[in-house]
Structure formats: C-alpha cells, structure tokens
Image (cartoon, grey):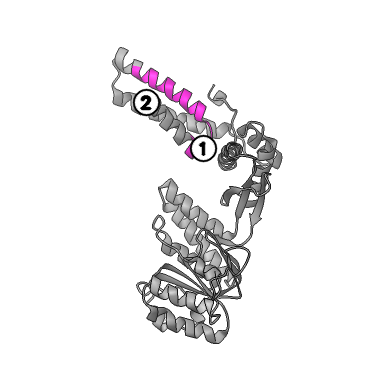
Amino acid sequence: MGAKLLKRIAGSANTYAGDGTTTAAVLSREILQRGIHAVEFERAHPISVKRGIDKALQVVLQYLKEISMPVTQPSELENLCKIASNQNLVVAEVVAQTLAMVGLEGVVNMTESSNGFTRFALVNDFVLERGFVSDLFTEDEEGKQLGPERMVELEQPLVLVVSDRITEVSEIVPVMEMVKKTKRPLIVFCEDMQEGPLSTMVYNNRKDIVESCCVNVPFLAGVEKENLKDIAAMTGATLVDNERFGLMLENLELHHFGSANNIRVDAEFTHIVGGSHTDEAIVERCEEIKRTIEREDSIHIKGVHKERLARMTSKIAEIQIGGGTDVERGEERDLIVDALNSARSALEHGILPGGGTALY
C-alpha cells in the first residue's frame, strides 16, 4: 500500500512538474514517517497534523517562488534539457530548439524517424489529427490507387463544415450539385457521415464529377463541435448548425463555404494550408479558447484545448525519434518526454537547485 502511494505521488509530480519524481518520493516518505510518529507517539490529532502540513506547504511554496530563477537564455534551456535527458546532447539540442520555436503554448508531436536520426520540424499549417472517412477517396473508377501514397490532395477546395451528422443522401446531393457548377474540389468536415451520403461522395469522386473527400470529427472530450468551429474559423466557412444558428444543409448557399489553398488528407491527419480566414476571426477564436483553458479544471481537457490553441496559431512541431530498434526508439522517446516536461516547467516557473537541495 505504501509503495502504491509513493508511486502515485511520483506520477503526480511528473504530471504537474515534468520531473522531480525522486525528490517527491523522498519527501513523501519523510512526511509520512513523521506524521505517523506524531500521531502514535506524541498523541497529535491526525486532522491537526494535516492542517499543519498544509500551512507548512504554503510557506515552502512561497520560499521556492522567491528563490527560483527564470530561464532567459537558450543555453540555459539546453543545459536543463541535458540534465533531464541524462546528458544526451542530441535530445537536449532538439528539445531546446523545438521549445524555442513553439513556446509554452505550442504542441509537440512525436513520430518515428524515417532515417534513424532524431530531429525536429516546424509544421506551419493547421493540422487536425483526423483522416478521411474512407480510403475509397484515394482510388479511381477502376479501384486503382491514384498516387504512390494513400492520400487525397485538393487544390483550392471549397470547405463545408457541418456540426451535425449527415445521414441522408438527399442532404448531400444538393451540395454536390452546387459545387459541381464551380468546378472546384469539395471537402466536408462533419460530426459523422453515414454510409448513404458517403457513397454518393465516393461515386462523384471516382467518376471525376466532383473531386471530394470527407473527414469525420467525432466525440473527443466533449469538444468535437469546438474543433469544427476552429476549422470554420480557419477556412472562413460558416458552421452549418441547425440547433444554434438555424442553418441547415438544404438552405446552404455558396457564400457559406470556406476555402483553402491546399488540403492534404491521409488515413490519420488532415493538413489545411492557406485557409481563407481573417486575422480578426483567428484572434477572436484564440481568445475564446484561452478563456476556456482558464475555466477548465481537468488537466486532460485543458491539454485538449491547448492543442486547439496551438493549431489555431500554427505553433506545432514534430520531433522525429531516431534509433535502430524499437527498444532504442523507446528509450529515446522517454528521454525526450522527460526533457520536454522539465523544460516546459522551467520556462513557466523558473529553475531551482536540483536533488531537493533547495529545501535546505
């Protein structure tokens, strides 16, 4: 039971601070031992002991804030990453460069490197972690794959964003007819595209009647409609939402569509490049997301909204993890995660002497 308690405490320290798991375990053990001694041998009341610990905690936190030093130089950040990554110079340099580019509000995704080397890249487009509904969009009329990769690439597409499920063929046919007249591709973002209307889109795509694709944005931590609003703001589209705005697919007009210079969709991701948005709309949307983050108590949900904010501001980086084997890549990934967590915590709260010595 005691081991499980310390394990939980160390996990919480890693979640909130990004490091300091050993210090947290040592301090917890000492607090637990002295607390038990006070209750059993000095006849202290358990509630009084708890209140005393809470008061002492506030004093210690205030003291640590006063002696913490802000991280102001890139070299300081890189040195911190070296310590957190067990003196791995490659990881330290990559993590320091990544955070210097995206900052605290940026999102860092990790993927497997194609050449075995660890490196980072800045992604400048709006990236949604959702792919096409069906890979049939990547095939021609004869069922042959259109390109070397299963990917749909649309140039100057019209963008339709629907906050509801599209269940009937009759809902999508007027949309396809309207888009056909413009001779432009179409991409649909919606909560859920059912088989009937999906088959209609695939048929039109295969027959080269309307080049198209569909991306579902399903339930995720209760923010699926917020994600759709983000896409609408990024592309200049009007969100089709009968419940809130009274706009239905049958009442759709051409000015309700958004657009982008280029949209690439594969099985896992959607990249929107050059969305037709206004700066005012993006700023307003970002401010709304920031207010949501401040109100949210859950760390997980807060992280989801931070990812939304990073997408809107295009502060997204990708660290490609190198290594010759799965074991090597796993170890490299753990070092990168430790370095990222420590660096973020240092940028937000400053740095202190390590090993718990700040408390002496």
Asked whether 153 or 200 is in front, the reply is: 200
Question: Marks 2 and 1, Cα distance to the nearest angstrom?
Answer: 24 Å
From the image, state whether disc 2 or disc 1 is nearer to you.
1
Asked whether 143 or 231 is in front, the reply is: 143
> In the rendered image, is residue 57 in sight?
yes
Mark 2, secondary structure of its residue: helix
Q: What segment is highlighted magenta in the picture?
A: 14-36
Q: Amino acid at mark 2?
A: Gly
Sequence-first disc among 2 and 1: 1
Crowd around label 1: few <14 · some 14–19 · many ≥20 (10 Å) = some
Q: Residue furthest top?
A: 41
Q: Main secondary structure of the magenta part?
A: helix
At x 43%, y 25%, the residue is 28
Q: Which quarter of the rendered picture does the N terminus lie within?
A: top left
Crowd around label 2: few <14 · some 14–19 · many ≥20 (10 Å) = few
* Residue under pointer 1: 17
* Residue under pointer 2: 52
Q: Is residue 113 left or right of residue 247?
A: right
> In the rendered image, is residue 248 in sight?
no
Q: Amino acid at mark 1?
A: Ala
Q: Is residue 27 magenta?
A: yes
The image position of residue 95, as x and y in percent, is: 64, 43
Mark 1, secondary structure of its residue: helix
At x 46%, y 29%, the residue is 59
Q: Is residue 84 left or right of residue 220?
A: right
The image position of residue 41, as x and y in percent, is: 31, 12
The image position of residue 83, as x and y in percent, is: 63, 32
Asked whether 37 or 174 is in front, the reply is: 174
Q: Is residue 335 left or right of residue 13?
A: right
